[in-house]
Amino acid sequence: MGDTGGIDQDAVMRARVMLLGSDRPSSREEIEAYRILAEVSPRVYLPKLAHALVKRGWELRDPEAHVALRTEAVDVVRRYDAEVPDREEQLLQALSGYEHALFAAHRRAEGRAVCEELAEAGRYGRLAVVLAEEGRHGEAADLLGRHVAPGDADVSEWSLIEWAAALDAAGRHEEALKVFTDVVDEARHTAGADRSPLASLVWKLEQYARMLRAAGRPADEAAARREALGLLGRLARGGEPVSWSNIQASWVTLLVLSGRPGEPAATPGAPLPAFGVHPVHGWSPDVREEYVASIPELERQTDGLRESGDLPGLIAAQRRLTVRRALRWETSGRRAEESLRPSFDEGVDLARHPGAGPGALARALTDRSMFLLAVKRYEEAHADSAEAATFQPIVTRT
């Protein structure tokens, strides 16, 4: 029992009676009771108070109220005795919830400071994302490079893709290719052993080819595209050898990453998504909200470009819009093919117009092929990629 001097014993009694009563208290009443009892028995009631604060936060729609509750939850956990089991882990969890609430309330500077504290404790992932969102790609790449080791059993392909994306955005193309080569090689290995779907390998090969082109390695790009086309032919003939349900997150993550060159440069004052990170599991909530919220404005922009006859501008804007729609489609849980396919069809139709150029058509066909692969229309996916290949220059090694 803690020191009860100065504590209102009547308030303590009322709190105990309320918690033990037959009527279940509201979450707000529960918090008030735990606040009082934590002064009497902190070891028992501080953890209960922390849990109640988090639960109450999820019930509220007001971002600032959520921040206030998460702030108190962190303060409560910091008051735990050092002997409390998993105290450090509970503090890290509380800080993670706190930074998420801060970003949701558009309080980025405070959220970044919490991410820095988490990184000092070994939880570096969120700080890497925040740095990338603010255009500090080199810092993000260096942070990831200190922790991510290709070939390490504890390192996921998601981490490697994120690292490669940060390196690429920082202009360190050869370093990025080296990391992404490991991603592709591992995908080849697992697909060859029937431990991962061929579709996933095809998506990675397409991203690999894009990176090789940016690095000025046309022969390697052509080889990657031939490999992807061969795999699509295999899928068209015999289907996927590995049963899979939902790997579309891989496709949409790489599609969104491919759209980065069409976006403005991110800055601390105008953050953009951390391309290469899955939106639901990685992006800060404020950035994700603004990225999806830009869809109506892009729709208006594309309508205006159609009227003006600016075909190159329309093709670029329509692709940005399609990428956002694909993200919304994949993350919404409502994945009817017909709700998204028209966007990819329109991209192909626009690119077929005279003046669009063969490069635009090859990209639009490839985009649609990767989507068709995501919805398991293998023959159509192969046909689009085969047509796209006719617009790629024939390159041979010397």
Image (spheres, helix red, strand yellow):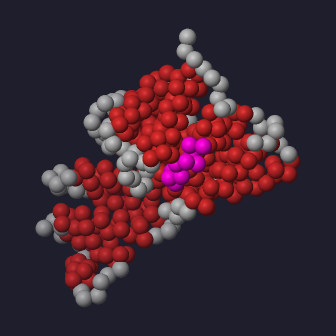
Q: Residue 71 in magenta? A: no
Decide: is 30 above or below 109. Answer: below
Residue in view at x 55 percent, y 63 percent: 336
The N terminus lies in quadrant: bottom left
Left/right of residue 317 with respect to residue 104 in the rendered view: right
Left/right of residue 347 with respect to residue 167 in the rendered view: right
Is residue 151 in view from this perspective? yes
Q: Residue 381 in magenta? A: yes
Decide: is 247 above or below 142. Answer: below
The tally of labels here is 0
263 or 114: nearer the viewer: 263
Judged by its main secondary structure, the magenta piece is helix
202 or 381: nearer the viewer: 381
Decide: is 212 above or below 244. Answer: above
Point out residue 237 in the picture as x, y percentages from the top left corner: 48, 45
Quadrant in which residue 397 is drawn: top right
Residue in view at x 58 percent, y 53 percent: 326
Residue in view at x 47 percent, y 38 percent: 231
The C terminus lies in quadrant: top right
Point out residue 386 in the picture as x, y percentages from the top left corner: 60, 38
Please report the bounds of the magenta region as a residue range: 374-383
- Name of the residue lying farthest toward the front: 237
Residue in view at x 61 percent, y 61 percent: 338
